[in-house]
Image (spheres, grey):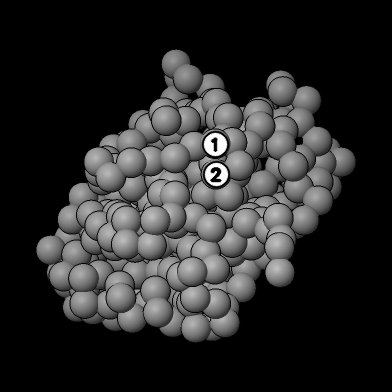
Amino acid sequence: MISNDVKILAIESSCDETAAAVVVNGRDVKSNVISTQIPLHTLYGGVVPEIASRKHTERINQVVKEALAKADTSLDEIDAIAVTYGPGLVGALLVGVAEAKAIAFAKKKPLVGVHHIEGHISANYIENKDLKPPFLCLVVSGGHTHLVHVKDYGKYEILGRTRDDAAGEAFDKVARAIGLGYPGGPKIEQKAKEGNPEAIHFTRPKVDDGIYDFSFSGLKSAVLNYLNKAQMTGAEVSEADVAASFQKAVIDSLVDHAAMAIDEFGMDKFAIAGGVASNQTLRAAFEKMCESKDVEFYHPSPILCTDNAAMIGAAGYYEYIAGHRDSWDLNAVPNLKLGER
Ligand code: KG4
Ligand code: ZN
């Protein structure tokens, strides 16, 4: 059968998930296999890069095989191989890049390198068939907090970014401080449900010389100071109130920045992406803000918010149809900038 459909095998290994997916025309996910290493890294309170790359090496072949089997397809029917080549942990990225290059070389298929954040943004295309650029997207993950103007497929302008900790990183660090363990985001979200978000007023982080930039390390210090002071004075601490008040401070800062950009750029579509975007309280706050401004709000399902390869297949498709191809010298770029191709 002759078809114009573009079937992409996508691979993602930038941090602690080994993932592969088969995606048709950037939006139709045929399979999305994720092998997470979270339980392993939990033992150490965070991601251990050496262990991450060793585990990727052990899992990658099986994960790719499973993704092809679940999509009921073979490598011969694949049109291109897309792979995350940055940013991320270099040893982890290299495993996916080497796998993608090996398959592309052996099967004589085009190779397309994808930026991890472009992947997170593109996760929104999968369940929202109507979503097309231009729109505004807030990417909130463990490594990044970016407010991005998506001008077109593959064309991005970063309006603001974090000056220090990423939003997810702040969740992880505060969770550790109140003894909730890793990964902190989901644990804080859970704990916050029993607490009062108005109980403690943590100062909202502010950056004076970049209106769209974020800062979360001051907020994290404020939480640590609060805990230390309570310990010294013997005051009782409600972990639930700390979690809820901290979470509210993060969300307020994110929503305020996004609302300002929506107004200034006159956007009528707003999307969120990245691991932190699976937070239900955060989603509700953005939904409310967008509704008040008559702006269409988009967000991926939680499984497409955290690291996965379906989002790399979505982004890879738009790179592929734009004619972007990589050669056998494609390398992992741990600090790759968005839109730097
Ligand atoms: O996008 P992601 O899976 O990996 C990176 O590219 O970093 O994001 C992981 C981050 C972690 O910091 C994790 O604590 C956070 O996302 N996270 C959450 C939630 N689920 C994951 N943060 C807040 N609330 C959640 N429900
Ligand atoms: Zn990510």
Q: Are marks 2 and 1 in contact (CB under 8 Å)?
A: yes
Picture quadrant where residue 263 is located: top right
Asked if residue 130 can be seen in this view, the reply is: yes
Who's the residue at 80% across and 36% down the image? Answer: 268
Q: Position of residue 20 (x, y in %)?
A: 43, 69
Dot 1: few (<14), some (14–19), or many (≥20) neighbours within 10 Å? few
Question: Residue furthest toward the top?
Answer: 209
The tag on residue 320 is 2
Question: Residue furthest toward the right?
Answer: 294
User: Could you say which is closer to the camera, residue 50 or residue 27?
Assistant: 27
Q: Position of residue 130 (x, y in %)?
A: 81, 51
Q: Is residue 305 left or right of residue 46?
A: right
Q: Position of residue 188 (x, y in %)?
A: 44, 67
The amino acid type, in three-letter code, at marker 2 is Tyr
The amino acid type, in three-letter code, at marker 1 is Gly
Residue, disc 1: 323
User: Could you say which is closer to the camera, residue 209 or residue 78?
Assistant: 78
Question: Residue furthest toward the left?
Answer: 50
